[in-house]
Image: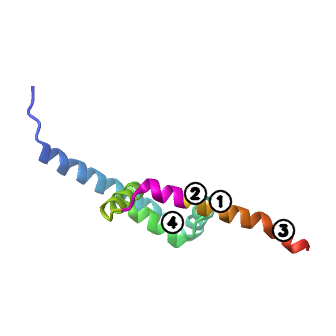
Amino acid sequence: MSKRYPVVDKVIDAFGNWHRRRRDIREMRGLDSSEFAKVARELNVTTTDLDTLVHQGPHAADELLHLLTLLGVDKEVLAKDAAACLARHDTRLHLLPAKAQA
């Protein structure tokens, strides 16, 4: 039975994560500008936003949640506020066609 070395495991995991991110970035850089723009359009984001998302890595949303927690922002309150905001926005969008016809 082999010993476990948590520090070594963390270093190996960190290196593996870094290597995967670099590979993803290299893959996106390998696309020509029209292919990159096509991917961005399919994802409904700008090319700048897509580039930023690729550089942030696949766990950027998790990091945002961690940052909000560190700042003392309650995710439940934030979710409730966001839902209310979207509902108001949706209501206003439904009023636009009626307003244009009047």
Q: Which residue is mark 2?
A: 83
**SS type, badge 2:** helix
The stretch in magenta equals: 73-81
C-alpha distance separating marks 2 and 1? 6 Å
Badge 1 local density, few (<14 within 10 Å), some, or many (20+)? Answer: few
Most distant residue in the top direction: 1
| Residue 20 at x, y percent in the picture | 34, 53
User: Which of the two discs, 2 and 3, labels the residue nearer the N terminus?
Assistant: 2
The residue type indicated by label 1 comes to Ala
Between circles 3 and 4, the one closer to the viewer is 3
User: Does the magenta run of residues contain 30?
Assistant: no
Q: Which residue is mark 3?
A: 97
Q: What is the quadrant of residue 100 in the picture?
A: bottom right
Q: Which residue is mark 1?
A: 87
Where 12 sits versus 33, above or below?
above
Q: Is the residue under label 1 in contact with that under label 2 (CB below 8 Å)?
A: yes
For this view, does 3 lie left or right of residue 53? left
**SS type, badge 1:** helix
Q: Which residue is mark 4?
A: 50
